[in-house]
Image: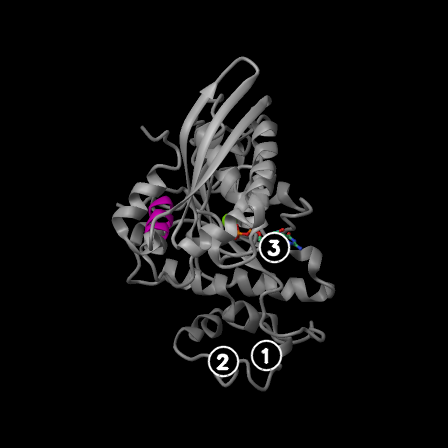
Amino acid sequence: MNRLPQETAPESTDAPRGGSCVILGAPNVGKSTLMNRLLGQSLSVTTPRPGTTRMHILGVQQIEDPPTQIAWMDTPGVARPKTALHQQLVQEASHAMENADCILLMDDCTDRGFKIQRSDPRRPKPSPEALQSSEAGDGPEDGDTIGKSSPETDPAYHVRESRAARILRQLTSSNGDSSTAAKPIVVAINKVDELGIKDYLLPRMSAWQAYEGVRAVVPVSALKGTQLDSLVKEVRKCLPEGMPYDPEMWTNRSERFFVCEHLRGSVMRQIRAEIPYGVAVYLDHYEEQDRLTRIQASIVVEKASHKGILIGKGGLQLKAIGTEARKAMETMLGKKVHLEVWVKVVEGWTRDPRRVRELLGSETAVQP
Ligand code: GDP
Ligand code: MG
């Protein structure tokens, strides 16, 4: 049945531990940034816009002392799944979660919907019941916090209303999958580098600590790399003993997958319009030579008008996309890349489940 929560016995603190940890959180909270930081590789596409991670990506972090292996899973964040593409992404995320030993829930301390004036450290701490009760009601008129402090300045209120708390409630709710509900959760409060007010952090941390299932709360900055050691330490405590992964392994994704990701990431960064969400990439040709890799790739868009935007006047836009992607590929592969890129239109592919499966599946494969 359900695995019992693992306690760290004092005598085995330094025993080898390993397992998987899935990173959950709202779009744009910094999941890909964290994973790339931890693995020291640019594995996931990071962009200033939400919803850009396409599939869950697994990378294994190996630590010598104490012996640790953590397989991090970065999940795509989709707030309200509308298209077939979104539904596929949500399915991937829930599958990743079911198989994980630990859940890292990312909170964003800038996620509060208001501008903070000042927090009051003397304010009474909310009870766990008060926190959980936000399920039913919503907003400031919702009983317990009102009168004690105003929602604008109340970290407990911000946590309760945060997108991360919504995810947590889904995880631990009784109608959720019970194997998921029993998993240990570590909360990372991200983007603390953007926090001007220091006495805001402690009450936000204790608000998180009050939630059932939360083993530890660590404030971090994924971008600056602050406090990541403490975060890893807390995740490690949640993992079973043993070293389950091949020491040579650092990702379950092939070079070809990342080649596609670099091209898709380049489109994301270069194009400002809505187009990037409907972009898929596949390889037509991939040939490794001694000092050169020859790559022919197709960018698929869902409208003919998008094709025009991607190509740009005199092909300049596509040239810029290709150049940026090629440089990233060369850095990753450690050799020269000859890259040719085509743009193809597959009308409305993100709404067609069969096309979505085909095109996402093909991101790693070379087309016949
Ligand atoms: P994801 O959608 O959760 O994968 O988020 P990303 O990792 O793609 O990050 C979204 C945006 O937040 C990017 O512009 C990041 O540079 C930024 N970001 C991530 N972590 C931090 C952080 O610790 N501090 C600040 N200030 N920005 C961050
Ligand atoms: Mg991401």
Q: Earlier in the sequence, mark 1 or mark 2?
A: 2
Residue neighbourhood size for the residue with mark 3, other residues' Cα within 10 Å, grouped as few (<14), some (14–19), many (≥20): many
The boundaries of the magenta stretch are 88-96
Q: Earlier in the sequence, mark 2 or mark 3?
A: 2
Real-space Cα distance between discs 1 and 2? 9 Å
Q: Badge 3 is on which residue? A: 190
Q: Badge 1 is on which residue? A: 151
Look at the magenta stretch and give its main secondary structure.
helix
Q: Nearer the viewer, residue 268 or 102?
A: 268
Real-space Cα distance between discs 2 and 3? 24 Å
Q: Badge 2 is on which residue? A: 139
Residue at the image position 54 percent from the left and 67 percent from the top: 159
Left or right of 219, for residue 286? left
Quarter of the image that includes the N terminus? top left
Quarter of the image that includes the C terminus? top left
Outermost top residue: 290
Which amino acid type corresponds to the residue marked 1 in the rendered image?
Pro
Q: Quadrant of residue 360?
A: top left
- Report the colour scheme: one colour
For mark 2, give the secondary structure: loop
For mark 3, give the secondary structure: strand
Q: Earlier in the sequence, mark 3 or mark 1?
A: 1
Q: Are marks 1 and 2 in contact (CB under 8 Å)?
A: yes
Which amino acid type corresponds to the residue marked 3 in the rendered image?
Asn
The spot of residue 279 in percent (x, y) is: 43, 48
The spot of residue 149 in percent (x, y) is: 62, 81
The spot of residue 224 in percent (x, y) is: 69, 47
Residue neighbourhood size for the residue with mark 1, other residues' Cα within 10 Å, grouped as few (<14), some (14–19), many (≥20): many
